[in-house]
Image (cartoon, rainbow, N blue to C red):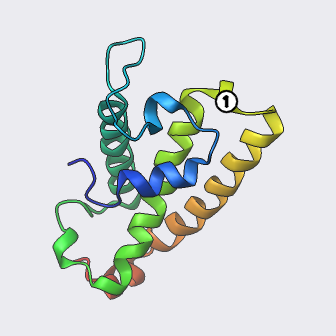
Amino acid sequence: MSWTLCTSGSAIVKAGANASAVLCSGSGIVQNTDGKTGAQCLAEFSDEVEGTICTKTRYNWVSNYSNITSQFKPILANIASDLIAMKIIGYDLSGWASKNEYLTMLNILKDNSDKCFDALEKDEYKKKMGAT
């Protein structure tokens, strides 16, 4: 299920320059204290977020991704990468200069994801997107 709606790179970029090096290292093999690599943690975040999007919108976007018309796939990537970026930021707050800095990042991502959820929850939009 991992990485159907967006790429890890798009989520990492949205998390910002101060995000956890464990999760955002170029190699993806740095291990956290649980022995998981950054790539494994990110894949878990992706699975969680994809499940959340499908549950909240009451439609399985992951299984039906190929049915979604191409011009509407970016909204799915947008919301998934926002939600994963929020998890990346929350994973390790030590890289941020201040609480206000990471809270601002989280607020921006939340505002955007809320707008995307508003659209994806509407049946008339789902139909237009190719969701059946």
The residue under label 1 is 95
Mark 1 crowdedness (10 Å alpha carbons): few <14, some 14-19, many ≥20: few
- Identify the residue at horizontal 30%, vertical 43% (top origin): 47
Along the horizontal axis of the image, is 36 left or right of 25?
left
Is 11 in front, or is 110?
11
Q: Position of residue 91 (x, y in %)?
A: 54, 29
Q: Residue at x 47, y 65 (%)?
A: 78
- Residue 68's place in the image compared with 47, above or below, is below
Q: Nearer the viewer, residue 126 or 66?
A: 66
Is 40 situated left or right of 23 in this image? left
Q: Quadrant of the C terminus?
A: bottom left
Residue 66 is left or right of residue 40, and the answer is: left
Depth order, front residue of 39/84 = 39
The residue under label 1 is which amino acid type? Answer: Gly
Residue 122 position in % (x across, y down) = 45, 75
Q: Position of residue 69 (x, y in %)?
A: 27, 84
Snapshot quadrant of residue 98: top right
Q: Residue at x 82, y 39 (%)?
A: 100
